[in-house]
Image (cartoon, helix red, strand yellow):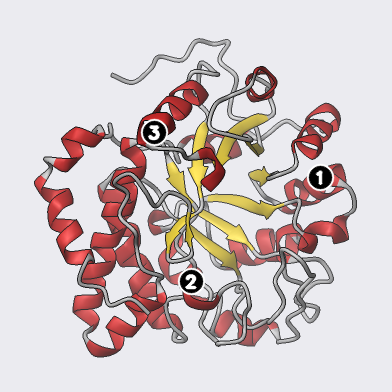
Amino acid sequence: MARRRSKHVLPPGPVVVDVAGTRLTKEEKRRLRHPLVGGVILFARNFENREQLCELTRKIHEAREEPLLISVDHEGGRVQRFRDDGFTVLPPMQALGRAWDQDPLGAMRMATAAGHVLAAELRACGVDFTFAPVLDLDYGVSKVIGTRAFHRDARVVAMLARALSQGLASAGMGACGKHFPGHGCVGADSHHEIPVDPRTLERIMTDDAAPYGWLGEHVLPAVMPAHVIYPKVDSQPAGFSRRWIQEILRGRLDYEGVVFSDDLTMEGAAVAGDILGRAQAALAAGCDMVLVCNRPDMADDLLARLEFTPSAESVARIRRLAPSRRALNWDSLQADSRYQHARRIQSQIVPV
């Protein structure tokens, strides 16, 4: 039965924070109760084993009357935070792109299975949401994207992303397309540099951004813009750009889902100033939620100084990211025929 909200329940705030270890500290519990906090992102350092992860997510969910959204970067390949104690080690998405080149329908079937396995295992441990799939095109030049991309062809990327997202949804989890409008054509890593993509708007929209327009919020209930500057479109990185988020993503592509900033502590975000300036720039551009990772000092500084009231539309979008159905616990999941069938299918993916 769904929890009944009282009129005093805080709406989800716009800030997503992280936690340092495998158990919540008193300081972290205090931070999670801040009204501007709306979610938590987990990392490999937060995982010791499944029992511990379940206890950690339970404590996080209990921190507020309206549970915080617990998320993770869990794509498969080298970006998979939990890999032990029963978690299926998933291949990088490039493996699905190569499978497509041999058998498109078979690749879509494997993508759907991989999405179901990914989401079902996370949800069995109390994780609500993953920042996947990557929609960047595989140009073979990006240091940070690499094998995380499905394919060079935007049409193939869209079809495999749709299949993977269908698998996520079958386990009650939404998808997040990233990194809008595209990070694949620049070599620099936005974690450490400020990438610049000199292409024209028309070229980017025809190629890299096309999957976002084709899929929409019903397949991708969330999108994450890139910390990349496209100077022929705007002088600001996409995640700080009203033109990219409001005019192009929400206007031209008619997208109505949640927009997350990428991590505001990354070097690619430094163009907007200190952490307050970065958050203000992202929110003013149209982001619904902003991520502050690996720097609790920055998170506390932001929470102490940020003055922001989310719109009713933004709150409604964020609430729609909550899981759409009750999750199976781990033991029940192992006995679930749909999950076991999906595991068998995804095991057929040939690693790259």
Amino acid type of the residue tagged 3 in the rendering: Gly
First in sequence: mark 3 vs mark 2: 3
Q: Residue 209: x and y, percent?
A: 55, 75
Q: Where is mark 1, residue-wise? A: 280
Q: Is residue 260 left or right of residue 1?
A: right
Amino acid type of the residue tagged 2 in the rendering: Arg
Q: Where is mark 2, residue-wise? A: 148
Is residue 43 shown to the viewer in this render?
Answer: no
Q: Nearer the viewer, residue 123 or 54?
A: 54
| CA distance separating discs 1 and 3 | 31 Å
Q: Which one is closest to the eye, mark 1 or mark 3?
A: 3
Q: Where is mark 3, residue-wise? A: 126
First in sequence: mark 1 vs mark 3: 3
Is residue 270 shown to the viewer in this render?
Answer: yes
Quarter of the image holding residue 346? bottom left
10 Å crowding of disc 2: few (<14), some (14-19), many (20+): many
Residue lying at 81% horizontally and 45% vertically, measured from the top left = 280
Q: Residue 50: x and y, percent?
A: 36, 36
Residue lying at 28% horizontally and 82% vertically, measured from the top left = 99
Quarter of the image holding residue 342? bottom left
Residue lying at 69% horizontally and 28% vertically, measured from the top left = 36
**The residue positioned farthest toward the right in the image shown:** 273
Relative to 129, say whether 346 is above or below: below
